[in-house]
Structure formats: structure tokens, C-alpha cells
Amino acid sequence: MTIRTLFAYLFGSRAAIEKFAVSRWSLPIGLLLVFSSGIARYYDNAYLPAEWTVLLRGIAVSTINSFVLVVLAYCFAARGDVKAGFPRMYVSFLGLFWMMAPMAWLYGIPYEHFLTPMGAVNANTWTLGLVSVWRVLLAARVLSVLFGVSAFAMFFPVMLFSDVAMWVATQFAPRPVLDLMGGMQLTEVERQISSSAMLVQAGTLLMIPLWAIATLVAAGFVEPKREQAAVGGAPIPKPNALLALGAVAICGWSVAAAVTQPALRLRHRAEELLQTGRVDDALMEMSTRNRSDYPPVWDAPPRRLFGEKFPPLQDIRLAMERKWPVPWVADMFMEKSWRDVASNLQAPVSEIEYLASMIEFSDSIDTEGLGFHLAHDKRFSEPDREKLREAIARRKRPK
């Protein structure tokens, strides 16, 4: 087995699938590739010395997913005899499933370093879609070869599983809050992430019944088994080239991680200070650094898009008043604070007349937070400050 065989396998070659299905080396090679793909996923968004467990997620999730897929394929192809017993079939498919890991190397493309934030979000979304479709098609092809069922028929149960898995993932993963009323003052990037998450969640839920029906219909037309691939630990020569590829992939992504980890260490330290209530220490430490010392796309806590409320923004305002941070830090938290204050105003800083009207007549205005901005927010001119202070005074008068 060579590197060329691996790439042929990734594009659905039956000969390559059969070679890996019988090889006892598929599991160790696949494990190396899965580990390398874990580094590719997280080298530029996790501080690995402290968050090293993220590297095990791919192994754990793929082990579970491959088990469910084999069970589903057994049920789907139950009209004929399956040559291999379940344990052998599962071990063989697990190796083949792990061999798909090079697809995830595409997640390691550092879009954030050469595209705009909005461009990076769109590029990551398209990359996720491409890899997901590729993985579904290849999984259907591999299972069709192992069970002797047409790839077209096997596509439906694989798609059903993938759709359910995606829906479950959206339920348990941190999810952006969609701003339906326009009061959260989201940025363009946050709005795009939020709407994409909602569309995925709603789309997968709507499609589950359709894929289930299609799977039942396809199962009714599955023909008795055609030629099935042999599975098991055949004594195939040690594939040194593929073992070397796995090792090189791990080393290569580790080198990339060495470049990004210093910035991620600073991010991890700042977030740890903020989330443990040491806001003054966090602002002081961040003020000793330049913005370029941190990851290019970083939003410090609290992240309202994900429903985070700690540390409280009032604590951040008080810490800023005790010792004002450097401009880039002040701007980051000033923007967070304004979004919090303006969440019920539904108006940008520039619409002074509307803001004054909302302040005067709204019952849910954070006057303390608003006072902080009137004192420190450079986006307000002096006449604007006076007009808004008058609105606050009129609101406080006895009726």
C-alpha cells in the first residue's frame, strides 16, 4: 500500500478500499492520520498544552460514529448474508473510517490570517460543507463495497445518520443566539454565524423524516448481496510510506502549532483571568501587549453571541474606571459594553434623537451603563452627551 493508494481510496477506488479492508495496518495508520487531523483542526484555535483533550475528540467521535454506521448498514443490508461477523466488520470499517482523516487537513487552512473576518467565516463554512459531503459520499461507497450493496442505496442510511448526527451536534455544541428582533447589535460576522447555525439546525431537523423515509424505501429494493469485500487482518507487507506520511503529517501540523501557540497562550491566559473574576489583572496584562500578539480573530469574554454572562460587564466597566486600559483593549470592551446597554434601545450611537427618545420612554434601560458611556465613549460629541443626559433626567422625574 502506497500514498497513491490512499489518495485513490479517498476518491472511492474499489481496489483501494479492498486493500485497506483486509490490511491489519489500516488501524494504526488511520490512528496516526486522525491524530494529525486533530492537530490540524485545533492548532490555531486552542492552546494545546492546557487544552490537549481536544486532540482526542476526533478519535472518540469517529469510534462512536463508525460503530453506529456499521450497525445501521447491517440492518439496511439484512436481506442477504454478510460474510464477516460484526466484530471483524466493525474493526475493518473503523480502520477505513479513520483513513478518511486527511479530508480534515482542509480545516487547517488558516483563512483568518489572510482573509477578512467575514471572508474567513464564509471560507470555513464552505470548507465544512465540502468535507461533510465528501465524507458522506465516501462512507456510502466504502459500506457498499463491504456489504455488497449499491452505493446509491447505501447513500440514504448514511445520509440519515449524518443528518441526525449534525442535528444532535447543534443541540449540544455552544450555539450562537439568533437576533430575531434586531436588539442585540450584532456585527456582520456574528450575524452570519448566528444565521448559519440556525439554518443548519432547522434544515437538519426538517430533513430527518425525509431521509428516514428514503432509507426505508431504499431498504425495500436492496438486492441480495453481490460480491462483498474481504475483511480481516491479512498479512500484508508493512506500508512504510503510509506510516511515514502519518508521522510527517503530525510533525508538519505540530510545526504550524508552534507558530500559533504563543498567541493562543496569551488568549488562554486572558480568558482564564476574566472568567475567574480577576478582571483588573486581565485588563492590566492585556494592556502590556499589542493586539497583534493575540489571535487575529478573537473575541474576549463575555461573548453575548453564545449567551455568556461572565464576567459581568458592570465589573469590566468598574475595572476600566479604576485603571483605564490601552486603546485597543478599551475599544474591545467598550463595544461589548455598548451592545449590552443598547440591547433594548435598538439604535446605533449615531442616531442621537432616537436614542434620546428611547432612553426617556423605555422602562428597561441600564442607566448606570449608559452613564459610563456618556463619560468615556469617544463616539459621543459633547452636545450629544448633553442631549442624552437631559433624556435621562426627564426619565427620572416624578410623573
Image (cartoon, rainbow, N blue to C red):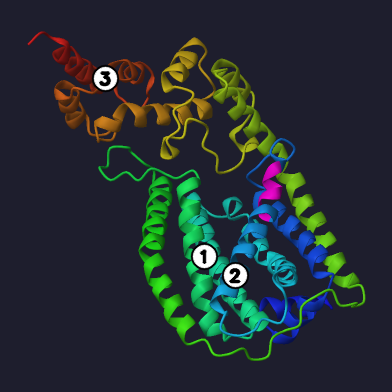
User: Cα distance, mark 1 to mark 3?
Assistant: 54 Å
| Nearer the observer, 89 or 205 | 89
Q: Is residue 349 visible?
A: no
Q: Residue furthest top?
A: 398
Image quarter hosting the C terminus: top left
Q: Amino acid at mark 3?
A: Arg
| Residue labelled with disc 3 | 385
Above or below, comparing residue 45 to residue 272 in the picture: below
> Can you identify the residue that label 2 sits on?
135
The residue singled out by tag 1 in the image is: 162
**What residue is rendered at 40% in x and 49% in y?**
194
| N-term-proximal mark, 1 vs 3 | 1
User: Are dots 2 and 1 in contact, CB under 8 Å?
Assistant: yes
Compare marks 2 and 1 and give the one earlier in the sequence: 2
Q: Quadrant of residue 139?
A: bottom right
Residue 366 in magenta stretch:
no
Q: Residue at x 45, y 32 (%)?
A: 308
Alpha carbon distance from label 2 to label 3: 56 Å
The chief SS type of the magenta part is helix
* Rendering coords of residue 10 (x, y %): 68, 76
Q: Secondary structure at mark 3?
A: helix
Left or right, residue 112 beside residue 170: right
Marks 2 and 3: which is nearer the front? 2
In the displayed structure, would residue 385 be above or below residue 135?
above
Which residue appears at 37% of the width and 67% of the height?
A: 209
Which of pointers 1 and 3 indicates the residue nearer the eye? 1
Q: What label sits on residue 290 in the rendered view?
A: none
3D distance between C-alphas at marks 2 and 1: 10 Å
Q: Which residues are magenta?
A: 53-58
**Category of crowding for the residue at label 1, using alpha-carbon neighbours closer than 10 angstroms: few (below 14), some (14–19), many (at least 20):** many
- Evaluate whether residue 187 shows in this view: yes
Q: Position of residue 116 (x, y in %)?
A: 51, 52
